[in-house]
Image (cartoon, helix red, strand yellow):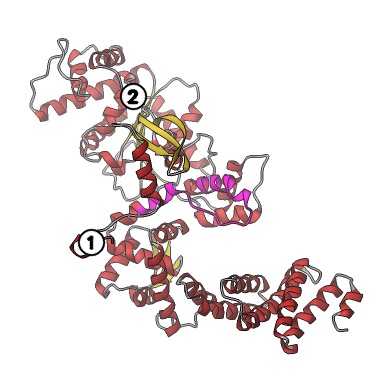
């Protein structure tokens, strides 16, 4: 909020609005400028002019001018390099090839290809095209769009414009000539050309005056004209038709699709229709129709896909490859995008955090937004708790009343964003993908995150929401995320000591290092030193257990503990660090130095 009294109003601050304002000042009237970050996300959907590096508020920015949408590309073609290996789909591609053989023999067929976003529907359809190679056939691609669900015959119009070769700057007369060139070899019926010209909004011309039909009659005749084009194409050579993303199809295109599916049986045509699982196809059970539901890849095939994306001459570290497979739950799109991110970024900084491409976040957030604010808020709370959470802890941490909470979490389950186990009041929940959890969490602003983690931590500290004792590292995580570092230090230390007692030294090392990182933010004081010495004196043996008695890292930790203990001038606090130094030097074969520690 800015201003005071009645003049108070909301304002937007941050890097994004600042960059947008800078681009606006650089843009000429009636132009669109984008920064490099946007250019990476639009793939090759748009024709862009590279304006080079310009200075904005003293900061160099690489700027691009968008001239318009690039015609003729599907989402798959625009956002994929085309070299993604096909893994784990041998049975499905074999089935498609059999259906294609049947279609070539005149037994037309439709294949309904369903699955969750990113599971590889478009890739499988593209793989069939690759297998056909130079085999004579026609290919017709129709793409439904989330932005045109109420634009009648949008995929049909877009395909005709692409096939005719329309350019953005073409005048109407030139477009009409191109349409005639496309259709002349297929139909001698001038009315068909007139109907399709009208469909493409080419206006009235002396050759094709406007047709005097009622709207319903014009639609019927336009449908008949389109079907005649398909039949004429199939008389020349077999036809492969791909309808992408039926979950976004407009109602009129659905009617037209109904008609072609009814007539396929006698044509040498194979129609593949892809859609997400939430779309309910009305044609199930009809003759000449096969339904294929694509499942996520198993771990072996996921690992094969990752290695295929990396290439034969390169190999990711095992822990990085395992992290990709673990987080993507067998969804090829997620595997592909995360692998690309890792190749570009993580290999430069091994062991660094794995970031998620913004394009995936956008897809997942759209699903959350469609469920409404209550469900989104519950998803955010669940995401802050973790990938898995209980209804009990969710209810104790949420501000919603019980009926709203139950309705919201049910919506998430029905949308297949989370899995439910058990009856609602006693249920535990699991986000379907780690990326779903991360996308929901990413919508929280920093202050919201801190407040939410504080609420969760308080619930856990009070013992509400969980029947079993909560692991100290869970409480520590929420306390640290809430900005309550002093309390977090205590619980991270407890977690480290608990892990040591269980001989889980690798985990103990991580917990103790978290304590040390938080201590570095505290001012120098005897109290800080005491905690630091105690933690370092526990960290050194844990390092020796994992890496060996002579591990240099353990020696450095023991030496640092001894240095800090000397400031305290306390033999009690100095003794453990001296003992650790003796162990390190003895293990390293430096007996004289080890003896001097007790000299």
Residue lying at 41% horizontally and 61% vertically, measured from the top left: 441
Dot in front, 2 or 1: 1
* Total numbered labels placed on residues in the image: 2
Q: Is residue 351 magenta?
A: yes
Give the numbered dot on residue 162: 2
- Residue at the spot of label 1: 8
Residues rendered magenta in the picture: 336-365
Q: Main secondary structure of the magenta part?
A: helix
Q: Looking at the rendering, in which quadrant would you find the N terminus?
A: bottom left
Percent across and percent down for residue 473 are 54, 75
Percent across and percent down for residue 390 are 41, 73
Give SS at disc 1: loop
Query: Looking at the image, can residue 466 be seen?
Result: yes
Residue lying at 59% horizontally and 79% vertically, measured from the top left: 493
293 sits to left or right of 340: left
Query: Looking at the image, can residue 249 be seen?
Result: no
Circle 2 Cα neighbour tier, 10 Å, few/some/many (<14 / 14–19 / ≥20) = some
């Amino acid at each position: 909020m800015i201003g005071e009294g009645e003049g108070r109003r909301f304002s937007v601050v941050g890097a994004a609005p600042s960059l947008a304002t800078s681009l606006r000042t650089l843009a000429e009237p009636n132009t669109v400028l984008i920064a490099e970050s946007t250019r990476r996300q639009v793939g090759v959907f748009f024709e862009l002019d590279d304006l080079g590096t310009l200075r904005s508020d003293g900061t160099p920015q690489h700027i691009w001018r968008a001239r318009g949408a690039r015609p003729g590309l599907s989402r798959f073609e625009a956002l994929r390099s085309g070299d993604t290996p096909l893994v784990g789909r041998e049975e499905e591609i074999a089935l498609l090839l059999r259906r294609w053989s049947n279609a070539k023999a005149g037994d037309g067929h439709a294949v309904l290809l369903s699955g969750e976003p990113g599971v590889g529907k478009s890739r499988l359809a593209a793989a069939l095209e690759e297998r056909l190679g130079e085999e004579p056939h026609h290919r017709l691609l129709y793409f439904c769009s989330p932005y045109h669900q109420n634009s009648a015959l949008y995929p049909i119009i877009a395909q005709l414009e692409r096939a005719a070769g329309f350019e953005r700057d073409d005048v109407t007369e030139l477009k009409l000539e191109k349409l005639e060139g496309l259709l002349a070899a297929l139909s001698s019926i001038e009315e068909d050309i007139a109907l399709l010209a009208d469909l493409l909004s080419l206006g009235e011309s002396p050759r094709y005056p406007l047709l005097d039909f009622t709207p319903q009659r014009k639609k019927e005749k336009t449908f008949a004209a389109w079907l005649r084009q398909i039949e004429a194409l199939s008389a020349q050579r077999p036809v492969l038709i791909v309808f992408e993303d039926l979950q976004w199809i407009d109602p009129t295109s659905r009617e037209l699709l109904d008609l072609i599916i009814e007539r396929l049986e006698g044509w040498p045509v194979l129609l593949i229709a892809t859609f997400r699982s939430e779309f309910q196809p009305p044609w199930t059970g009809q003759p000449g129709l096969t339904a294929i539901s694509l499942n996520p890849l198993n771990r072996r095939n996921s690992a094969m896909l990752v290695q295929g994306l990396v290439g034969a001459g390169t190999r990711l570290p095992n822990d990085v490859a395992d992290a990709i497979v673990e987080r993507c739950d067998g969804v090829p799109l997620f595997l592909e995008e995360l692998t690309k991110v890792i190749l570009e970024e993580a290999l430069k900084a091994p062991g660094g955090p794995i970031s998620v491409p913004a394009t995936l976040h956008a897809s997942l957030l759209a699903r959350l937004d469609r469920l409404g604010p209550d469900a989104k808020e519950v998803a955010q709370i669940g995401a802050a708790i973790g990938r898995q959470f209980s209804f009990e802890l969710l209810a104790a941490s949420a501000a919603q009343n019980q009926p709203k909470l139950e309705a919201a979490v049910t919506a998430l389950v029905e949308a297949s964003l989370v899995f439910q186990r058990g009856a609602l009041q006693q249920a535990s929940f699991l986000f379907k993908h780690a990326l779903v959890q991360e996308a929901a969490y990413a919508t929280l602003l920093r202050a919201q995150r801190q407040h939410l983690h504080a609420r969760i931590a308080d619930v856990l500290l009070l013992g509400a929401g969980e029947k079993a004792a909560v692991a100290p590292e869970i409480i520590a995580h929420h306390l640290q995320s809430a900005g309550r570092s002093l309390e977090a230090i205590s619980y991270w230390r407890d977690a480290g000591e608990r892990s040591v007692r269980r001989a889980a030294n690798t985990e103990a090392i991580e917990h103790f290092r978290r304590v040390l990182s938080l201590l570095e933010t505290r001012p120098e004081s005897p109290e800080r030193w005491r905690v630091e010495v105690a933690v370092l004196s526990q960290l050194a043996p844990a390092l020796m257990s994992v890496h060996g008695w002579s591990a240099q890292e353990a020696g450095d930790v023991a030496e640092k503990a001894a240095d800090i203990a000397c400031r305290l001038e306390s033999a009690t606090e100095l003794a453990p660090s001296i003992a650790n130094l003796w162990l390190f030097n003895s293990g390293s074969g430096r007996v004289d130095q080890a003896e001097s520690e007790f000299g």
